[in-house]
Image (cartoon, rainbow, N blue to C red):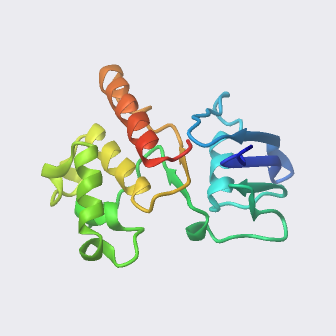
Amino acid sequence: MTTSPRLQVRNLIRAFDGQRVVNDVSFTVSPGEVACLLGPSGCGKSTTLRIIAGVDMQDSGSIHVDGKLVCDTVYRVPPERRAIGLMFQDFALFPHLPVSENVAFGLKGGYRANRERVGALLERVHMSRHVDSYPHELSGGEQQRVALARALAPQPRVLLMDEPFSGLDERLRDGIRDDTLALLKDEGTAV
């Protein structure tokens, strides 16, 4: 039995002011697989991730998750219904919300309705003791862990990460990267 790719990107093109930023990008990611987009700064990696997540729109091409069309130039599933998580380079935590509410932000019913899921994720990323802390009270590595928990909270089928470890020192980056990959494997999420 052949399984469908978890994520399939076909011939994505995106231009700004006539300049192609994403130029005919195609790739496939299987369930449980980790894939990387590599290239110099400004070559369209972040734009490609934003298109896949649904926060930007391609000029042509299509995106499929588990064999189902999520987006082309005619049909478009809204970002919140794509089962795709996006973790930004700057973590994008809400400064006015404590850690618990940041993690629960994308969940129906908020923190109270999802206390068990939020608690389990915070425990997995070693942030349980910071449940009531605010982002400004956390180190960069701690903020990164909260952002990861928030991205995983709605149980996405695909998690896109835009340079999530770039602001961390080498020792911390290696430890968090290994923890992240283990957590994603346990969650059954393709990256």
Residue 55's spot in the image, x, y percent?
62, 62
Residue at the extreme top: 171
In the image shown, does 143 or 40 lie closer to the viewer?
Answer: 143
The correct choice, above or below, for 32 with respect to 59 in the image is above
Q: Residue at x 61, y 64 (%)?
A: 82
Question: In the rendered image, is residue 95 in sight?
Answer: no
Residue at left 83%, top 45%?
A: 20
Residue farthest toward the front in the current orientation of the protein: 1
Looking at the image, residue 94 sits to the left or right of residue 43; the answer is left
Q: Is residue 20 left or right of residue 175?
A: right
Instruction: Find residue 44 and report its horizontal and vertical position in percent.
Output: 70, 41
Question: For the C terminus, which image quadrant?
Answer: top right
Q: Position of residue 41 (x, y in %)?
A: 63, 32
Q: Tell me the quarter of the picture where residue 186 sits.
A: top left
Horizontally, residue 87 falls left or right of residue 36, namely: left
Return the x and y of residue 46 as percentages of the image width and height: 62, 44
Residue, x 39% and y 35% (percent of image)? 182
Residue nearest the viewer, comparing 124 with 166: 124
Q: Which residue occupies the foreground of this view, 111 or 65?
A: 65
Kindly identify the residue that appears in the image at 40 percent across and 49 percent down: 91
Res 94 quadrant in image: bottom left
